[in-house]
Amino acid sequence: MSTQDRNDKKGASPALSRRSFLSKGAAAGVGAAAITGAAATEAKAEIKWDHTADVVIIGAGVSGLAAAITARDHGVSVIAVEENYDIGGRGILSGGRLHLGGGNAIQKKHGIKDSPDQVYADWVRFDANSARYSDRDLVRVFADENLATYDFLVENGVEFIDRMIGPEAASTIPRTFVTVEWHVPSELIAPGRNRNGSGLVRRLEASARKKGAQIFLRHKMMKIIREQENSRRVIGIAAMNGSNPVNIQARKGVIIATGGHTGNVNFRRTFDPRLTEEYQQACEPWVHQGGDGELAAMELGASLWATANQTREAGAAITKTRHIGCRWGYSSLVYQPESPMFRLARATGLTVEDWQNVIFVNQNGKRFWNEVDGSYNFFAACMAWHGDKTKLNGGGPIWAIFDADAATREKWNTKPPNVDPDGYFFSADTIAELAGKIKNPYQKQPMSGAVLQETVARYNSFVAAGADSDFKKPTPLYKIEKPPFYAAWSTPILHDTLTGLRTNTNGEVIDIRGEAIPGLYCAGEAQGGFAQHGLARCLAFGRVAARHAAGRTA
Amino acid sequence: MTTESHSTAIALSEPAPAEVAAGTELMLKVELTCAAGCELHSLPLTVTGPDDSAASACHINDNGEVSLRIPPTVGPQSFTIASGPHEAAGVRHEPCSLSLTVNSIPHGTSLAVWDIPSPIVKGERLAIKVGAKSAADAELKGLEIAVLDNGEKVVARGRLRDAPWPGTTALYWDEVELSAPGEEGLHKWSVRFDAEGLALPHDGTAAEFTAVVSRPPEHCLTVKVIEQQSKAPIADVQIRLGPFRGTTDPAGIAEVMMPKGTYDLHVWKTAYEAADRLVEIKGDLSVQVEAVFVPEEDPDNAWTM
């Protein structure tokens, strides 16, 4: 596929082009670094600034757009740079769930009593994995910003579905509501799949632009520029627009709103060494989640914070693949053929309704756990060492094995575009033959047909007897016996980034010595300390950071 | 005019596989080089195979490959790929050659066994389906398959039918009848396929299958499954008592015929939970199971105004 083929409706490819930019080119990147690196080490007066604004925001997703509007509301100029060809980040692919309470209008309408104190109390609960590791100073800020953030959304045109959901996660009362999906199909990334987050980011984008925020698309931040090499004060960023270096001055502050790091194998393994390359990231190929913001700030001495959140074993940091037989089968996210991402995603996947219909095998063709389990014990089993002396970390690919009867029960059509036969889905007339067909970049050695045949025969004996002697799968129901047979990619997929840069309560980035880096802020998934799933914390801290930056002396 | 002499060499650019299936085409990556740097890609080559009395002509294709036809016999096979001499425009490219031996092996075969009834009543006849597949997609019709009991005694034979099983590329199959053993419990059989009589050499193969043998069912267990809160019947619940099974109808009822005994009763349906319970079958029996609905919100649920 040529680069041109990958181009989207607006004429550029997103994450893939960024990756290709980063890899092949490192040539372009090195050149850019040479230019901007020189700029960064020179005195402020010697830097050639291509653009200047009071506040420069890196990333035009949920937190970046909230920051841009807030900065404009405080009367300062704003430039937001976005590496993708369009705004939205992961927010545009989200379900649009907002976890905001405090006694806001929609809660009141539904008779739900809440307060900022209750939000705080819930989200510092010791008995909830999703709350116990958080920085309570940041939770307090979040709680106190709930009402204002709700009002902010209303004032900026965001519409909500009139229904409350919950309680969810650490919350003890319903606080979740959903935005209305964006109404222009051609401006959706995953049309037809209820990705209501599109309504949030498109409304915020419209408001930001109307209020005068500038959004530079296809501008990738390469470096955060300090005043001088030994100065701590941040004064701008160096970016690349295609092959053109662009220096953007920030008179008051730079806000990192780059999203998470789950797409960066090296970085994510900081928190869990098991997360090797075979684990895909939920929102690829639309966004890469490369940890760019965290890395750029860490080069300036920034600290990470509340890193226990990343491995707390609650929520959606890693999830079961729900749509098997494609590379990116994350729970609620399917790129249909009409999606601009489909040419990269290549398949929709086969949606599993009943895990009784498949068995999971590892790269050696052996079962390893009860298939109907979706707990973190299951993920640990997936990532266990399976005896490969050349790969000690990570568990390798996980394959769902099933037969023609299972396909009938699930009403699966096992042909493209439902499956990706280029490495993520295979079929064969016999189980032994199926094993030999499995070829995938992450399958480091051939699967033995004899082993897979033995695995299936053993499982079938459990079905006949009515008891799984190996892994206690409750009531194993269906033999895998009727040809043809199938192997579908079912390796767990990564989602939430739950840790990131340390900030204070103003969103200022804190360095490894515990001091704020002047002029540098962070919000959203790149920010550590408060690991609530979803959009609300991104909105709240985007506003907090922009408000403080706008008030700084230039 | 004087002729300039250039030495040449032919070598593998990727290692040859140690083993190749008999009767197949092996694409071998080779490089033909000139010591003086001339481009020799388009020069004709000759290949002498193990069965060839005379060399055959060939070229290196655009992928840098030369095609070798592996004879349909098993064992070491020697080939020689030769070039030149070639003389043109006052340059003589001297001859060179490459000799190599690859081991020709039989094609693999594999089996599938399906539609195995379970449980089966001891001593009764049962029918199963058996399919055999050649890795070379060879036509297997008419070949014999044998079913052996756990003591390796042949208990049934079949002959593969003319057409492959629907939906497969080349799985030739037959339905085979055999008798259930006289003892209760989980029994194991194997299917053997010798793959003899094919034009290309094939290895035989075997596969195991299992089924539970039981006493004749005497009594009817009626299971009704209802939702704990609403008391509404739940359809399509899978009922399991060891090897015995049933599925609830729209009225939430399943009837399972089974012999006397004590069984763990399990029920299964996605998004429902119910505790297992022990049932003792001494005669016909009716039980009611209350299942708790544990809603798993479908992430694809539409959110509308």
Image: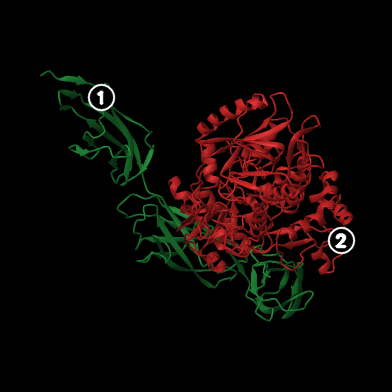
Q: How many other residues sit within 10 Å of disc 2, few (<14), some (14-19) or many (≥20)?
A: some
Kindly give the residue lying farthest to the left in the view shown. B1
- For the residue pair A277 and B264, the one nearer the viewer reads as A277
How far apart marks 1 and 2 lie (CA) works out to 86 Å
**Quadrant in which the N terminus of chain B is drawn:** top left
Percent across and percent down for residue A190 are: 58, 58
Name the image colouring.
by chain
Q: How many other residues sit within 10 Å of disc 1, few (<14), some (14-19) or many (≥20)?
A: many
Q: Which residue is mark 1?
A: B8
Indicate the amino acid at tag 2.
Asp
- For the residue pair B3 and B106, the one nearer the viewer reads as B3
Q: Is residue A170 visible?
A: no
Q: Are marks 1 and 2 in contact (CB under 8 Å)?
A: no
Q: Which chain is home to disc 2?
A: A
Q: Which chain is home to disc 1?
A: B
Identify the hue of chain B: green
Indicate the amino acid at tag 1.
Thr
Percent across and percent down for residue A75 are: 74, 47
SS assignment at label 2? loop
Please report the residue visible at 74 percent of the width from the left and 28 percent of the height from the top. Answer: A232
**Quadrant in which the C terminus of chain B is drawn:** bottom right
Q: Is residue A190 visible?
A: yes
Please report the residue visible at 22 percent of the width from the left and 21 percent of the height from the top. Answer: B6
- Number of labels in the image equals 2
- For the residue pair A380 and A484, the one nearer the viewer reads as A380
Q: In the rendered view, would you say A91 is above or below A515?
A: below
Percent across and percent down for residue A265 are: 62, 39
Which chain does the red colour mark?
Answer: A
Q: Which residue is mark 2?
A: A114
Please report the residue visible at 36 percent of the width from the left and 32 percent of the height from the top. Answer: B13
Relative placement, left or right, of A14 versus A531 is left
Relative placement, left or right, of A461 versus A505 is left
